[in-house]
Image (cartoon, rainbow, N blue to C red):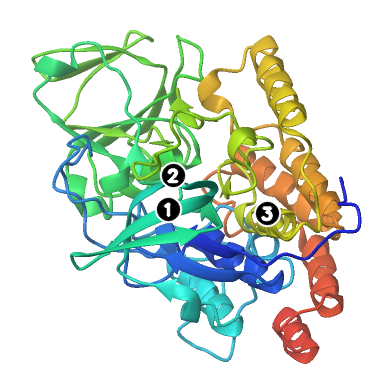
């Protein structure tokens, strides 16, 4: 931590873009530090990506730049990968709410339960009073007359507002603008294509032969979701050996392949393992791009091959800090606690309670990080991927130290390790079959001790029930 010398406490007027989980906790932490906050939310409710809608975009691949954009990428049956105990914010446990029968009590809960939790959080901390709903950010740029200020233009039902802020915190998420696989021959292939962003229910592909591109957790999850209604599902994975061809357990119509070699005009899909299938639909479960169409930094922040940079510790662009910051860019993490720690850091830096290194030191640190990725042969597009199981906790604990806040609990780390081992060993049952009850007990012991807005009697009753 780099504490300020005799740190001043300075209150700033801060714009937060997005009212998903990152934007909600950023707003809370900023107000806790004494800042005045306005949250801009394009939709009519909180939740961001967790606000499920059955609606999809008219362009199933989401390529058309003029298409009406649907923010959420949730499908109807989605349940959380991460158990609720380690998913929640550190001082607001994600508990089973037994007093409300409409709530989902499962450890790996439905998306509707996550949204309900975020609503509980927003209600408890009175965050909605800071939010302007149905207000789209049109442009964010430095104010010409004062480059330390930020001009924020927004649109609400056609009315344009032009305001000046001391700082802008970008929390617009990164699960809306799809990435796509490059498939040889796809221009003449006659079948349908869809990105998982526009997948909602299995009936969309009923009685079809479907090729799913992508073997990450979401690709496998969707494959199992549709396998019950399709003729066949073939998963194409670039992380397997070229000869890979496996029938996956639990289903008679689900296979794992290596990469697609080519597709043909007759509707066939040829894999590098030599197998050929005739498919009706190719579904791209290939991830998303970072996308900030409203942000004009005159080239100080760019998105190149899905690297947002240069950013010091994934948050501050050195040349524009502390006035501009980003919350929530890292992925394959426990998101909510990381959002919380990043937000605490940003809020403390803005008050002057915590100081950033010099511009030169931040740039040098960032360049060293990029050089380390390159030396390890990690592609630029994986800059914000925290794939190593402990790298996110090293990062989280660094953030905690900056803010003089408790480090991530050991039970939370261990719970994360265990769930990913279960995914690998029991991919079809890991959400309902586990062996870490001792970690759940440790979590609830912590929930009672930690400053929380739930009465300890309620926490104890939830766990013992």
Mark 3 to mark 1: distance in Å?
A: 19 Å
Please name whichever residue, 461 or 120, is drawn nearer the observer in this view of the structure.
120
How many residues crowd around disc 3 within 10 Å: few (fewer than 14), some, or many (20 or more)?
A: many
Q: Quadrant of the C terminus?
A: bottom right
Which residue is pictured at 64% across the width and 72% down the height?
A: 31
User: Which mark lies nearer to you, 3 or 2?
Assistant: 2
Tell me: 225 left or right of 415: left
- Image: 373 above or below 242: below
Mark 2 and 1 residues: CB-CB less than 8 Å, in contact?
yes
Mark 2 to mark 1: distance in Å?
A: 9 Å
Q: How many marks?
A: 3
Tell me: 35 left or right of 279: right
Q: Which mark is residue 449?
A: none
**Circle 2 — which element?**
loop
**Circle 1 — which element?**
strand
**Circle 3 — which element?**
helix
Q: Position of residue 278 (x, y in %)?
A: 17, 22
Mark 3 and 1 residues: CB-CB less than 8 Å, in contact?
no
Q: Residue furthest front?
A: 145
- Image: 357 above or below 324: above
Q: Position of residue 213 (x, y in %)?
A: 35, 28
Q: Position of residue 277 (x, y in %)?
A: 23, 20
- Image: 135 above or below 434: below
Q: Which residue is mark 3?
A: 346
Tell me: 2 left or right of 301: right
Q: Which residue is mark 2?
A: 144
Q: Position of residue 411 (x, y in %)?
A: 82, 57
Q: Which mark is residue 151?
A: 1
Which residue is pictured at 78% across the width and 84% down the height?
A: 460
User: Which mark lies nearer to you, 2 or 1?
Assistant: 2
Mark 3 to mark 2: distance in Å?
A: 24 Å
- Image: 277 above or below 353: above
């Amino acid at each position: 931590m780099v504490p300020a010398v005799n740190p001043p406490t300075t209150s700033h007027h801060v714009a937060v873009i997005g009212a998903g989980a990152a934007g909600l906790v950023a707003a809370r932490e900023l107000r806790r530090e004494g800042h005045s906050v306005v949250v801009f939310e394009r939709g009519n409710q909180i939740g961001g990506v967790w606000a499920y809608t059955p609606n999809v975009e008219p362009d199933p691949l989401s390529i058309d730049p003029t298409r009406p954009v649907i923010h959420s990428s949730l499908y109807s049956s989605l349940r959380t990968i991460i158990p609720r105990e380690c998913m929640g914010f550190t001082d607001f446990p994600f508990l089973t709410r037994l007093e409300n029968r409409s709530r989902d009590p499962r450890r790996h809960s439905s998306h509707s339960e996550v949204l309900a939790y975020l609503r509980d959080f927003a209600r408890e901390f009175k965050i909605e009073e800071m939010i302007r709903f149905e207000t789209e950010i049109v442009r964010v740029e430095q104010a010409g007359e004062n480059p330390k200020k930020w001009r924020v233009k927004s649109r609400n039902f056609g009315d344009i507002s032009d305001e000046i802020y001391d700082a802008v915190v970008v929390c617009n998420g990164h699960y809306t603008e799809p990435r796509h696989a490059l498939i040889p021959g796809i221009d003449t292939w006659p079948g349908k294509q869809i990105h998982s962003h526009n997948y909602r229910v299995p009936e969309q592909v009923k009685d079809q032969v479907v090729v799913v591109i992508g073997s990450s957790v979401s690709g496998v999850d969707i494959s199992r979701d549709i396998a019950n209604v399709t003729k066949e599902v073939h998963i194409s994975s670039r992380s397997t050996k070229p000869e890979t061809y496996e029938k996956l357990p639990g289903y008679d119509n689900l296979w794992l392949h290596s990469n697609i070699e080519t597709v043909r005009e007759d509707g066939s899909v040829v894999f590098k393992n030599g197998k050929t299938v005739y498919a009706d639909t190719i579904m791209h479960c290939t991830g998303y791009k970072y996308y900030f169409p409203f942000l004009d930094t005159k080239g100080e922040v760019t998105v190149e091959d899905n690297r947002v940079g240069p950013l010091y510790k994934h948050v501050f662009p050195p040349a524009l800090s502390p006035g501009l910051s980003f919350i929530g860019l890292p992925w394959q993490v426990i998101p909510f606690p990381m959002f919380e720690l990043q937000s605490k850091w940003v809020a403390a830096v803005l008050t002057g309670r915590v100081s950033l290194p010099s511009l030169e030191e931040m740039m040098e640190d960032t360049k060293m990080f990029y050089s380390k990725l390159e030396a390890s042969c990690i592609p630029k597009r994986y800059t914000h991927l925290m794939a190593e199981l402990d790298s996110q906790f090293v990062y989280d604990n660094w953030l905690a130290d900056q803010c003089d806040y408790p480090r991530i609990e050991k039970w939370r780390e261990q719970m994360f390790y265990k769930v990913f081992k279960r995914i690998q060993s029991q991919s079809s049952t890991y959400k309902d079959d586990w062996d870490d009850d001792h970690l759940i007990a440790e979590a609830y012991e912590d929930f009672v001790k930690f400053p929380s807005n739930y009465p300890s009697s309620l926490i104890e009753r939830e766990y013992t029930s």
